[in-house]
Amino acid sequence: MAKMSFENHIMKQFDDELEEIRTRLMEMGGKVEQQVQNAVRAISEADSKLAEEVIIEEQVVDEMEVDIDTACILIIARRQPAASDLRLVMMVTKAINDLERIGDEAKKIANHAILLVEEGGSSKGYPEIRHIGASVSKMLANALDAFARFDADAAMSTIEEDKQIDLDYKTALRELVTYMMEDPRSISRVINVLWVVRSLERIGDHTKNLCEQIIFVVKGKDIRHK
Amino acid sequence: MSPAETPKAVKVVKKSKTAPKSKKAVAPKIAPVHNLDIGDHHVTVGEIFSDKPKMTMRNINVFYADKQAIHDVSIDIAENEVIAMIGPSGCGKSTFLRALNRMNDTVDGCRVEGDIRMDGEDLYAPKLDVVELRARVGMVFQKPNPFPKSIYDNVAYGPKIHGLADTRVDLDEIVENSLRKASLWEEVKERLHQPGTGLSGGQQQRLCIARAIAVSPEVILMDEPCSALDPIATARIEELIEELSQNFTIAIVTHSMQQAARVSHRTAYFHLGKLIEVNPTKQVFTMPEHPLTEAYITGRFG
């Protein structure tokens, strides 16, 4: 297996172009990671101003997606990349899609944060949000790290983290259903919490996709649906 | 490359430096492939052999005087397969191709060692008729080289000397069929008796292909058949290769990696006279097995 390196093309410009989409993907990942953290914090700290910020910043993530996508199309048109270069470009076009969807989920969480702040009252369900939110943020950070280092093993162990998140999600659901049964007046509020937990679980799934794509770049193996 | 793009790239690099929250991607620094010598002990990787071989080559060494151009190459070419041979200049791919129909015999000081067989028959057997061999293993060259004769005579020449046609009607039929198979018939049927050299480059190359297939070869060797042609003529030849592979086995040497990717079923990568890798084309261009193949097809040899 050839080691991962996107340098040393005869055409230096090609190196720069690949390095550029790589760096921009990392930037987008950093931005999305921050969005998720802020959205979760907006809920636990009842900070609707922070939530508003997340909603506005979602546009930036969208723009990043479009820009990187355009850069990838240009590389394919001009360089006809092959082998590991091709795999990198294809991976980036897919990864930005997942990152953008994570951004969407963060925005949804922020919307619910505002609703929860407006309703006020108890913070039932927040520990679950904080707990799953922390696990998901960590998983996303690990995935981006694995991408920065093209580390397939790290990507593989990050995929495993999604299993725990799915379990925690199911446990949280049961918990939230109990709250609703105990106190029917809390139903609308708990449903908001439920959507947040659902969004976090989806973020875990998108992060898992990201890891699968990293493995595809490094190993050339498609491990989706396996 | 378009100079208009340069400022954009520069701008983005700046942006990434100033972006506050961005994680700087740290690519692992890996030394470029400078040491291209792969040593004496070398094993070709990939799918080298075939269950249904048309031609088998075993331990081929080719020398020009005392300089060795091909080192111990073994490979099968399967029936009705299109196999592409790629590699940097001087890697021996053309030399190897020419060994397949003994074109190297005519080169002074060139010596071929090893075992080359077609359908099990030794092509270097002393009794073998080389003229007949070259009818069975036809060749198309880099530059179109029609004879200075009419279009008709260019195609009819081979069948005539090999006695493939008894009557004028038979010959007419062979000429028409060959020109049709080479997708040239519609363009030249009104002017069959005008000189072949009056055709355009792309048409001349298709005439040479028609000439090669007129003697019903089993294998067609193509040595960079499109390097003197424009993109449209190239596309026509590539389309033709696809059609011809229904009836013939084709080995093509090309400098265009995209062409190898487009037309071939298997790709063989040569490097400094050694066969590095043979694999299905779809694998070679997405996930090559050998780092040297990867370096070559991604454009990393300096």
Image (tube, helix red, strand yellow):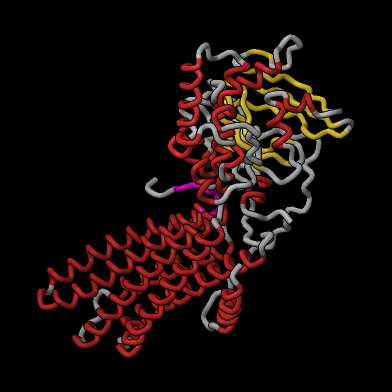
Q: In this view, does B109 lie above or below A160?
A: above
Q: Which residue lies furthest to the top in this view?
A: B127
Q: Residue furthest right?
A: B66
Question: Residue A190 in the image: x percent, y percent?
Answer: 19, 74
Q: Horizontally, is A185 left or right of A159 in the view? A: left
The answer to whether residue B53 of the structure is visible from this angle is no
Q: In this view, does A77 lie above or below B77?
A: below
Question: Residue B219 in the image: x percent, y percent?
Answer: 58, 25
Residue B46 sits in quarter: top right
Q: Which residue lies furthest to the bottom in this view?
A: A49
Q: In this view, does A144 lie above or below B52?
A: below
B159 or A196, nearer to the observer: B159
First to last magenta residue range: A217-222
Residue A99 sits in quarter: bottom left
The quarter of the image holding the C terminus of chain B is bottom right
- Please give the name of the residue rendered at 40% of the width and 49% of the height, measured from the top-left corner: A224
Question: Residue B175 in the image: x percent, y percent?
Answer: 50, 25
The answer to whether residue B139 of the structure is visible from this angle is yes
Q: How many marks?
A: 0
B152 or B111, nearer to the observer: B152
Question: Residue A36 in the image: x percent, y percent?
Answer: 38, 75
Verify whether residue B243 appears in magenta. no
Verify whether residue A218 appears in magenta. yes
A123 or B251, nearer to the observer: B251
Residue B6 sits in quarter: bottom right
The quarter of the image holding the N terminus of chain B is bottom right
B219 or B162, nearer to the observer: B162
- Please give the name of the residue rendered at 53% of the width and 77% of the height, measured from the top-left corner: B22
